[in-house]
Amino acid sequence: MSRKVIFYLVDGARPDVLYRLAKEGQLPNIQKYMIDEGSSTVGTTCFPSTTGPAYLPFLCGTFPGDHGITGIRWFDKAEFFRGRWGRNSMRSYCGYEAKYFDDDMDSKYPSLFETYDRGFNIYNMIVKGVKPENDLTKEGKSGLYLRAHYQHKHHAVDEKGHEKLMEALYKNPQFVYAVFPSVDWDSHCYHYEDDRTIEAYKIVDRSVGEVVNKLKEQGEYEDTLIVMASDHGLTSTHTHFDLGRFWKKAGYRVLEYPNIMKIRPQVAVFISGNSFGTVSFLDQKEMYVESLLEERHGKALDKFVQEPGVDFIVYRKSATDFIVRNENGKAEISVSGQTVRYTATTGNPFGIRDTDRYVDEKVAFTHCFDSDYPDGLWQVKQLMESPRSGDVVVSAAVGYDLRDFWEYPEHKGSHGSLHKDHIHIPVLVNQPDLLPEPIRSTRVYGMIRNWLDKNDTNHYV
């Protein structure tokens, strides 16, 4: 019997909510098969913590910055000055440009769909390597998503997705990646603990029960790894702090989606998940570093970091040193090869201890996992090493987001930031002893490969 993996991507599921609902008996199948008989933990997603880019760690074992996909919207300063209307000068995966996502991925990091022949896709926007006949929701997805978005008829999407998941079980799959988007949509529209959101969790639970029963009926359950995770958390939004409007009031001509036809723009503002943004100043072609950035735009930045909607900003001190700044001061994250160091200078925006030396990826994870900014050091590194992170990265304060004027319907919940409520995710599997400790989402990729390749030495982790 060949092994298989069924991956439930429960978009926007918060670990505290999912585990509480399971404990209360509202998610009996998840409790039985994934928690009691399997193993579970709290993991971390990537920065920005937003749908699409946050799928890359699961599917490729890499971070968004490794692919230059630094948000659901991004701006490439070098390409912009090379030719403003070139295809790769800017991107928004929220519209027709979503079809470019696969092409934008770095070919050095093949996805699980490219690695395993019998991969099936349900609602996932990343279809690189999926055979056309195995993209089970390609037909009808647009109509379902439009009705869900504008009529708030979300649950029909998940119910149809479950039907397609059951269909996939008859096709001898190696790997099924099934996105259940309604938890995220209901959290955005109402609240992450609204009754409609809770019902979206229950749809996933019922799906797990039916999938397990079918696998047992087919004699395939013991050889199947069922994985459940989210791509990000989410918090309720009480105030919209529009990033583009701030820079307009500061006297800049702003290029932003959907207003990308702006004549002689001076700054490009790109938002993801509504709690993450990048700012690129267009008065020079090169990326800004601290000294020149503060000389030319310091007054606006001084005012910007005092805004209550801004939790912190990040910009470059040099190619390998980054400034983290909030209203109380600055710290530095320095990179040397595959190690990082954190030093509070005039302030301590992350509220963590200085590292006494450069630390590797594993130590960096542990160093700040229990802080307000889990995995903050490594996430800043992976993001800022891509030029598409812009001159300034903005992480919104909890309760705020960064987009108002162009947002319809209004978002009452947001994500994308580096705060723990957006970064922490649930990770569960139906097999015991696979999750003894918290993990990054990139390690889920390794766990899947170990299972499918029957590699007991954890070669991919």
Image (tube, rainbow, N blue to C red):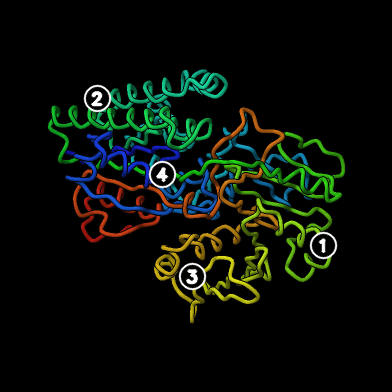
Circle 2 residue: 170
**Picture coordinates of residue 124 (x, y %)?**
45, 34
Asked which secondary structure carries label 2, the reply is helix
Asked which secondary structure carries label 1, the reply is helix
Q: Does residue 399 appear left or right of residue 257 in this picture?
A: left
Which label belongs to residue 397?
Answer: none
Q: Could you tell me the amino acid type at mark 1?
A: Lys
Residue 57 or 148: which is nearer the viewer?
Answer: 148
* Sooner in the amino-acid sequence: mark 1 or mark 4: 4
Asked which secondary structure carries label 3, the reply is loop
Circle 1 residue: 299
Marks 2 and 4 close (CB-CB < 8 Å): no
- The answer for how far apart the CA atoms under marks 2 and 4 are is 31 Å
Q: Does residue 37 appear left or right of residue 159 in this picture?
A: left
Crowding near the residue tagged with mark 3, few <14, some 14–19, many ≥20 C-alpha atoms within 10 Å: few
Circle 3 residue: 338
Residue 357 or 59: which is nearer the viewer?
Answer: 357
Q: Residue at x 57, y 76 (%)?
A: 343
* Sooner in the amino-acid sequence: mark 2 or mark 4: 4
**Picture coordinates of residue 385 (x, y %)?**
59, 61
Circle 4 residue: 14
* Sooner in the amino-acid sequence: mark 1 or mark 2: 2
* Sooner in the amino-acid sequence: mark 2 or mark 3: 2
* Sooner in the amino-acid sequence: mark 3 or mark 1: 1
Q: Is residue 72 visible?
A: no
* Residue 193 vertical placement versus 327 (above, below): above
Q: Could you tell me the amino acid type at mark 4?
A: Arg
Q: Is residue 131 visible?
A: yes
- The answer for how far apart the CA atoms under marks 2 and 3 are is 44 Å
**Picture coordinates of residue 133 (x, y %)?**
39, 24
